[in-house]
């Protein structure tokens, strides 16, 4: 059997973190078993589905590196097939036309509430002949759900879950306007797409009981179900924007790397021993559908940011320069050269690409635009600053090693601590008191620009 999974988002908004994690789990599972990962856009809610949302979903998946097999399926375009199945169920006796008016349904609801019962349909058209149908009512098609026994779901995450069939009312398959309901469309599409394993949020667990009935009524194979726990905020509350529940594209804009996001998301409710940091290839090798916990995962922005810092440090300098160039296309060849050669020191201090860009400003501008107050305090001794430059200018080989050797020699000759030399130089070159090695910076920007920055520092009041 070829494993086939799917991700089926509704295009009514951005691709949020929970959806991204669901897509990732399906993608990893399919790749682990050498199967297929399919994409279905559930766009049947025409009033809320938008092209912008579809594009955001596709863009988000692409950024995450979750490639799908075959062309995306758009659920709305398959309405005729959904109708065909609903009508076939009527012919086979598994469904029926219901001609209840809105007033009758409201009356049922009120009576159930008065009797302390759930507001379920009472099945009054379940066995009636359509010859009794009122002519002014357009019928819906309802499924004839079993009234006795139990429906059992063997869920790979939740275990064996059971519901008494008398709790399942005769759900609507086809509305009076001829449009299929979610319950019907999902089952028909999953069957026709050959889906073997359904991995989705545990908020869909109750849907599985009803959907299983459709599979069995049609004589179709029931897929394996895996209902994964939802993601909460660090405080245990339902994930919201204040916890970081933003669209995936927002994390791209905030400077996160897709491999860091994949690594972080896969660890939400899934574990492989004590491993915290691992490659996507390792995740594919290890993700066999087991070791998924039942408890809600907690989204922690601090942990994600820390993990992202690790991936930035592990990234090649060339790739990081490329990413910065993509974000800031106006960078000149000279600026890119400096950033490239200073990247080793820059990436050690950055946890996001935004921080990396901010740190890289020392290589973007020719001279500092701003000096912090603390930096200015190190530039007040103009005599020392001039002495440092006069001596530093004598260095013949303008590279980090020789510049560092010069500083040590200057320190010993003038009985000044090395730190008391480095800080004025750092303040002059960067306008700050925090940066990569000042000798690395001086080597990268070159002697002429180093002199220019010293001169500006000397001219400061």
Image: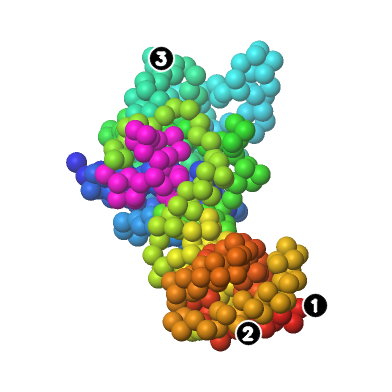
- Check disc 1 and report the residue beneath it: 461
Q: In the rendered structure, which segment of residues is drawn in magenta? A: 260-285
First-in-chain label (3 vs 1): 3
Badge 1 marks a residue whose secondary structure is loop
Whether residue 268 appears in magenta in the rendering, the answer is yes
- Check disc 2 and report the residue beneath it: 452
First-in-chain label (2 vs 1): 2
Q: Which mark is residue 148?
A: 3
Q: Quadrant of residue 267?
A: top left
- Frontmost of labels 3 and 2 is 2
Q: Residue furthest bottom?
A: 448
Q: CA distance from mark 3 to mark 2?
A: 87 Å
Is residue 164 placed above or below 50 in the rendered structure?
above
Q: Position of residue 170 (x, y in %)?
A: 48, 27
* Residue 355 or residue 27, whichever sits in front: 355
Quarter the N terminus occupies: top left
């Amino acid at each position: 059997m070829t494993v086939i999974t799917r991700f089926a988002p509704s295009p009514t908004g951005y691709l949020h973190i929970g959806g991204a994690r669901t897509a990732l789990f399906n993608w990893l599972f399919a790749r682990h078993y050498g199967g297929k990962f399919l994409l279905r856009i559930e766009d049947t809610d025409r009033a809320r589905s938008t092209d912008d949302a579809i594009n955001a979903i596709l863009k988000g998946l692409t950024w995450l590196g979750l490639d799908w097999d075959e062309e995306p399926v758009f659920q709305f375009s398959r309405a005729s097939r959904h109708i065909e199945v609903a009508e076939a169920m009527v012919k086979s006796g598994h469904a029926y036309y219901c001609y209840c008016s809105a007033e009758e349904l409201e009356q049922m609801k009120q009576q159930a509430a008065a009797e302390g019962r759930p507001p379920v349909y009472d099945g009054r058209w379940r066995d009636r002949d359509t010859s009794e149908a009122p002519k002014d009512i357009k019928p819906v098609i309802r499924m004839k759900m079993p009234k006795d026994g139990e429906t059992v779901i063997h869920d790979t995450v939740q275990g064996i879950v059971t519901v008494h069939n008398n709790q399942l009312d005769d759900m609507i398959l086809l509305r009076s306007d001829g449009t299929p309901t979610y319950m019907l469309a999902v089952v028909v599409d999953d069957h026709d797409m050959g889906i073997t394993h359904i991995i989705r949020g545990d908020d869909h667990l109750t849907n599985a009981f009803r959907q299983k009935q459709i599979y069995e009524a049609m004589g179709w194979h029931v897929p394996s179900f895996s209902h994964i726990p939802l993601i909460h905020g660090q405080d245990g509350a339902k994930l919201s924007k204040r916890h970081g529940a933003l669209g995936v594209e927002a994390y791209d804009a905030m400077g996160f790397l897709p491999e860091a996001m994949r690594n972080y998301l896969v660890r939400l409710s899934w574990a492989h021993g004590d491993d915290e940091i691992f490659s996507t290839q390792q995740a594919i090798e290890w993700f066999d559908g087991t070791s998924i916990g039942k408890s809600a995962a907690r989204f922690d922005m601090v942990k994600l940011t820390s993990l992202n810092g690790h991936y930035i440090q592990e990234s090649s300098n060339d790739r990081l320069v490329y990413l910065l160039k993509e974000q800031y296309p106006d960078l000149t060849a000279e600026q890119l050269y400096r950033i490239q050669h200073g990247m080793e020191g820059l990436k050690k201090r950055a946890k996001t690409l935004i921080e990396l860009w901010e740190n890289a400003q020392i290589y973007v501008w020719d001279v500092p635009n701003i000096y912090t107050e603390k930096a200015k305090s190190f530039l007040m001794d103009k005599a020392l600053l001039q002495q440092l430059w006069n001596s530093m200018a004598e260095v013949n080989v303008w590279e980090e090693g020789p510049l560092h050797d010069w500083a040590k020699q200057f320190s010993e000759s003038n009985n000044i601590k090395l730190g008391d030399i480095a800080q004025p130089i750092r303040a002059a070159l960067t306008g700050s008191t925090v940066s990569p090695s000042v000798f690395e910076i001086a080597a990268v920007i070159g002697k002429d620009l180093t002199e220019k920055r010293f001169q500006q520092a000397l001219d400061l009041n």
